[in-house]
Amino acid sequence: MNTNEKVFEVRTNRLGRFELYQNGKLVQKVCRTCGKVKLASEFLRYTQGHYRPDCHECFNKWQRKYIQENRDLRTVYRQRNRAREVGAPDNYNLEDYLELKAFANGRCMISGKKTDNLQVEHVQTLSKRVLGSTKGNIILVCEEVNQAKRDMSLFEFLQSERSRGLVDREQLERTIRYLADANGMTPQEYLDFLYRAEELAKDIKEFFENENKAN
């Protein structure tokens, strides 16, 4: 047998996909994800040395998606834990958050500013222990709005000097409509709901203050 002769062999891997070998060395294989035949050099290797089932391009896409999804999930868990710590409702979930991100589309939900650094903010602050981390009480805002609003409810923020130059009326109206619709309300019903939540928060605060004085 000529030692320089190229001997090709087609094998089937454990996933049932074909692999092409030349003189015992893998030269081509089918990507598990995209289904395309690619050179072996287009596949990453495990630390043990054998090739991954997905090509480099598909693996990178999967990795980016995995990192983003887990980042989103951590964000949701963090907001739920914050609400739980103060005894407020904490039923926000990943689907709610992904819908919110899709609506915001990279824009602050109060100022309308386009940014890559949207931050989670509560319409009514968690410290008031009424609305908590729920679908009607979480929005995404830019850093400037987040820092200015701080411990204020949305109503308090809009009436304060801190909101000067940070509120886009059209964007705010879109946000109110979105939050209302997400909770099966009209915009006016949602605003009335927020107002009642503020009144309830005041009653709760007064109750605990009176309890402390009595003790």
Image (tube, rainbow, N blue to C red):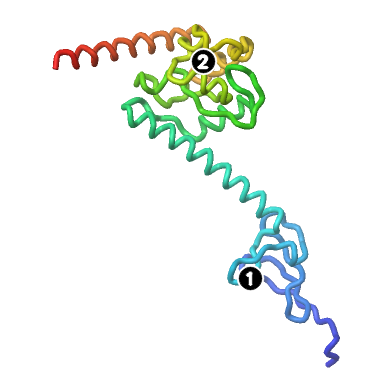
Left or right position of 105 against 77 = right
For this rendering, which residue is in front, 31 or 12?
A: 31
Image quadrant holding the N terminus, namely bottom right
Q: Residue at x 67, y 59 (%)?
A: 54
Q: Which image quadrant for residue 5?
A: bottom right
Q: Is residue 10 above or below residue 147?
A: below
Q: Is residue 207 above or below residue 82?
A: above
Image quadrant holding the C terminus, namely top left
Q: Secondary structure at mark 2?
A: helix
Q: Position of residue 124 (x, y in %)?
A: 43, 18
First-in-chain label (1 vs 2): 1
Q: Position of residue 6 (x, y in %)?
A: 84, 81
Going by the picture, which residue comes out furthest to the front?
Answer: 161
Please name the amino acid that badge 1 sits on. Answer: His
Q: Secondary structure at mark 1?
A: loop
Please name the amino acid that badge 2 sits on. Answer: Ala
Q: Which residue was labeled with disc 1?
A: 50
Mark 1: few, some, or many residues within 10 Å (few <14, many ≥20)?
Answer: few
Q: Which image quadrant for residue 40?
A: bottom right
